[in-house]
Image (cartoon, rainbow, N blue to C red):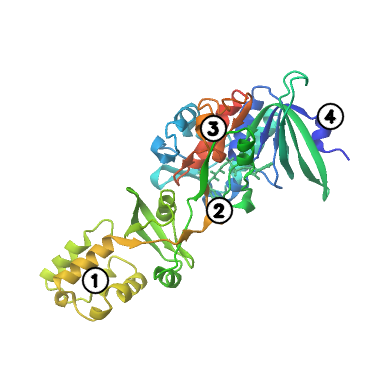
Amino acid sequence: MQSNTQKNNPVNQYDVIVLGAGAAGLMAAITAASRNRSVLVVEKSNKIGKKILMSGGGKSNFTNTSIEFDNFISQNPHFCKSALSRYTAFDFIKLVEKHKIEYEERKDHQLFCIHSSKDIVNMLQKECSASGVEIIKDTDVEFVEVLSKKEPEKLNYLLKGSREYLKKSEPFEVKCESLIVATGALSIPTLGGSDFGYKLAKQFALPLVKPAAGLVPFMFSDFIKPIAESLSGLSVDVEVSCQKKSFKGGLLFTHRGLSGPAILQISNYWNPGQEIVVNLLPDLDASKELQKEKNGNNKLLLRSFLSNHLSKSLVLELQKIWWPSISESSIQDISRKDLIKIGSLLNHWVLKPSSTEGYRTAEVTLWGVDTSSISSKTMEVNCQPKMYFIGEVLDVTGHLGGFNFQWAWSSGYCAGLVA
Ligand SMILES: Cc1cc2nc3c(=O)[nH]c(=O)nc-3n(C[C@H](O)[C@H](O)[C@H](O)COP(=O)(O)OP(=O)(O)OC[C@H]3O[C@@H](n4cnc5c(N)ncnc54)[C@H](O)[C@@H]3O)c2cc1C
């Protein structure tokens, strides 16, 4: 039985093969096919754009209208600049508007679909069909060989793997002139997370910056574990800091530890063994405020006063650890020294995560293929003509807020323009 690919192209040869039908791969494929290149996208799972579908709580935070280069983390912070300026958030918005997808701008310039992230995947699928991109799913590419110069002109790579077809596994082989590696990275294996891009990098002797889970919740093994468990589901607006970086936003207590946007953001800057500092009252100097209340002879219990600023259940948990012996004293009766201490804990709560939840729940993988071996303009491997790396597999990671998709669109576009 012939597969569709074999029927359409009996010799299984393409100008461009894109490995991975995620955000970066699909954008690269559309861009290359619009230049009249024959393009095949090979995807190992049964669906394209799985991460797009799951993103932004099902509404996909597909870009951000205020892209700054310091929203990205990389050993080479300048690497992302060229691609992000060549294909901007506004270029992607134009595409979204062309397809009449309704979207909205939320806090911090983040753009989300109003209806569903399926709109973005459908848009990419339509663009692929319109430009003649072929997509083959359920196909795992396992090897890439460089073809010898004896091969017909322009065929540089042979890809080998296996394909699930009609519930059977069959061998799969294709050849191409240009190979675009868009296989993503290690985060969330059930959504396609894979180390294949790193294996290819190794095969072609490209250096790798040791990857780590990013945008990921923290776990704890100390006193905070039972507190987080009992407050599970509660979200508080805080400021979190680590390594001189700070983020304001929601902190969510979970039955495993801490999550929420501010925690995910700071996880990108945390290394095992380090502490994080949570400011529970970022808009208030708590020590000063409590002393002011004491000076005014406030007769309220500390927990009653703090419940005006923080959720009652959180205040009760804090009381257990910070002022159990004076829990029934009014503010006016608590010593100045104790109020200053409690105030500074509220503004500077030092916590030591035992680990992160790891790749199982990480939204991204930090680090990856070292950009020193890649052209920042075209994403081509410097020492391997016609091989390109794009998207998350590279050592470029965005903050939370649509930056990771914008990196995928921009890097995919740049490779698609030349591949
Ligand atoms: C739950 C979740 C929510 C997120 N929400 C957002 C958000 O709202 N905004 C944002 O900007 N970012 C978000 N991100 C991050 C964003 O999804 C990624 O940065 C982006 O998808 C990376 O795109 P990519 O194309 O490089 O890789 P991927 O999207 O991971 O695509 C890689 C593809 O390659 C395929 N593949 C891997 N190995 C092979 C192989 N050997 N053969 C064939 N195919 C292979 C995989 O199956 C996969 O489909 C989210 C991530 C997650 C996990």
**Pointer 3 local density, CA inside 10 Å: few below 14, some 14–19, many at least 20:** many
Which structural element holds mark 3? helix
What amino acid is found at the position of numbered circle 3 in the picture?
A: Ser
Which structural element holds mark 2? helix
Q: Which one is earlier in the sequence, the residue at label 1 or at label 2? A: 1
Please identify the residue farthest to the front as the structure is shown: 205
Q: Say if mark 3 contacts mark 1, CB within 8 Å.
A: no
Which of the 4 image quadrants contains residue 289? Answer: bottom left
What amino acid is found at the position of numbered circle 4 in the picture?
A: Pro
Name the spot of residue 304 as percent of width and height, x first: 26, 74
Q: Does the residue labelled 3 lie within 8 Å of ligand 1?
A: yes
**Pointer 2 local density, CA inside 10 Å: few below 14, some 14–19, many at least 20:** many
For residue 411, the mark is 3
Which structural element holds mark 1? helix
Name the spot of residue 97 as percent of width and height, x first: 53, 35
Q: Say if mark 1 contacts mark 2, CB within 8 Å.
A: no
Q: Mark 4 points at which residue?
A: 10
Real-space CA distance between mark 3 and mark 4, rounded to the nearest whole angstrom: 31 Å
**Pointer 1 local density, CA inside 10 Å: few below 14, some 14–19, many at least 20:** some
Q: Name the residue under label 1.
A: 305
For residue 148, the mark is none
Real-space CA distance between mark 2 and mark 3, rounded to the nearest whole angstrom: 23 Å
What amino acid is found at the position of numbered circle 2 in the picture?
A: Tyr
Real-space CA distance between mark 1 and mark 2, rounded to the nearest whole angstrom: 41 Å
Q: Mark 2 points at which residue?
A: 359
Q: Which one is earlier in the sequence, the residue at label 2 or at label 3? A: 2
Q: Which one is earlier in the sequence, the residue at label 4 or at label 1? A: 4
